[in-house]
Image (tube, helix red, strand yellow):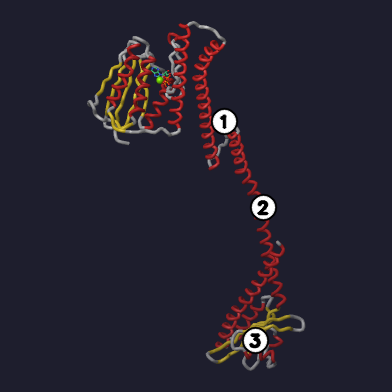
Amino acid sequence: MLAALALMLWVSEYRYLIQKTWRQESSNMDKLAGVAKEAIITKNDFLVVYYFKEYKRNPMVKSVALQLPDGQFSVHTDTRFMGTVRQDADGFWALSIEAPAMRHVKDAQENIRELAAPIYHGAEKLAVVRVEYYEEIVRQLILKELYVIMWGLVWVGVGVLLIGFFGAMLLALTFTRPIEQLVAAVRSIGEGKWEKRIDMERSDELGYLATEFNHMAKKLEDLYSAQQFFVRSLTHDLGAPLAGIRGYVDLWHDGVDLGSEKTQQALATMRVATDRMKRALQETLDLFKIRAGRMQLSKKPFSLRDLAAETVRILAPLGDARKMKIRVQSSVNNGEMDVFADRDKISQVITNLISNALKYTPQGAGDILVRIMKNEKATVLCVADKGPGMTDEDQKKIFLPFYRIQSDAAGEKIPGTGLGLAIAQGIVEAHNGRIWVESQLGKGTKFYFALPNEKS
Ligand SMILES: Nc1ncnc2c1ncn2[C@@H]1O[C@H](COP(=O)(O)OP(=O)(O)OP(=O)(O)O)[C@@H](O)[C@H]1O
Ligand SMILES: [Mg+2]
């Protein structure tokens, strides 16, 4: 295949060189004829002789001659023919042409090619320039040139092969290896090895890919541990009350008689336990909806001040039980429809904030204050208590699902799932609002949320 290609290339290149040579020689003939004409007109034979001799130095050229119309060679580089007259067919050929011509002559020893060009002065034919070439030498010279070209091509080919080889090696070193590394890392992640990272210091696209991969892996790892935490917490929240219920069921199953008073107590405990489980499930479901962006909001304008007052009325009995008052303060005009939001969902947020304040503030520490403020951009609600407060560290974490501050103040175990604030945050943010906390350990806590005023 390669050999056939090389042969084709060889043949076509050879043909091209032959054609080029004769084209070149034909155009030289014009120059030669020009010089001869000039010499004839100025009668300067010496110029022609000198020029023809120079021309014959070319090894392809056998002879150069100037033949007059009567057949006489006025100049001939083969001195034997100088001044001789040729009127045979050979001589006649050149005399008969009217335009530059070419012919092959098969001599006894060699193949000759002859080019001839007539010289005119007006309509008068002054003479003919004749140049004979050795065909064999022309062929040899062309073959020599062809060899040079072909060797050049071979070297170029070898060079290309070498460059290709080293290029491929370089490519393997600079790209294939890092890509293999990336693939291995992706596979590890796929197998659940979340801690896998790529160690690659590069400033190109692959380095960028590695950095992005590491970010993604970190996010996946965080997500996975959050999910683990979520499942553990939920299992605990459902598992603990279930275990309690199961304990009583086992007693009754074994025929143990607790007596009517203890039985009543057990039933009350079981009711609280099932309520807790129901709440935990409901809250988890809410959170899932929020996380999946599937929370439906039915927005309408309403007064945040009215909603706060209403919520406080509902929760007041809880406060009374803990000997705490919940006061409402508002700088918003009575009855002003200041927010455009889902009233039930916002009520859920306020309920959680106030019930947290009630739950976590020890009895006698002070009252709870609910304030509503408004500026040109947003309406803000604040729930302030004089409870235990929290550290900066805890302030950063309390909005995370299931996060609860570990405190065993007075050994009191306050019930809760740790989902309330996460849900509140989800609801507020779904309204393009913001929720935040300001707190000082030992002084109290203020929870704020802001809802944009404009209809959005
Ligand atoms: N006003 C507050 N003062 C002190 N700590 C608080 C206050 N509000 C919340 N916290 C802390 O933040 C944690 C998270 O509150 P969050 O409302 O999310 O959950 P929870 O009250 O424990 O349970 P629930 O899901 O029933 O609301 C609480 O467990 C508590 O430790
Ligand atoms: Mg709560």
Name which residue lies at 60% across and 86% down: 45
Counting residues from the N terminus, which is met first, the one under dot 3 or under dot 1? 3
Between marks 2 and 3 in the image, the one whose residue lies nearer the viewer: 2
Q: Position of residue 194 (x, y in %)?
A: 57, 30
Between marks 2 and 1 in the image, the one whose residue lies nearer the viewer: 1
Q: What residue is pinned by disc 3?
A: 75
* Mark 2 CB near ligand 1 (8 Å cut): no
Q: Position of residue 419 (x, y in %)?
A: 44, 23
Badge 3: residue crowd in 10 Å (few <14, some 14–19, many ≥20): many
Figure quadrant of the C terminus:
top left
For residue 319, side relative to residue 109 (left or right): left
Cα separation between marks 2 and 3: 58 Å
- Ligand number 1: quarter of image: top left
* Mark 3 CB near ligand 1 (8 Å cut): no
Counting residues from the N terminus, which is met first, the one under dot 2 or under dot 3? 3
Q: Nearer the viewer, residue 104 or 165?
A: 165
Q: Nearer the viewer, residue 34 or 284?
A: 284
Q: Position of residue 63 (x, y in %)?
A: 68, 82
Residue type marked 2: Leu
Circle 3/circle 1 CB separation < 8 Å: no
Q: What residue is pinned by disc 2?
A: 162
Mark 1: secondary structure: loop
Query: Is 162 located above or below residue 353 in the figure?
Result: below
**Residue 32 sits in quarter:** bottom right
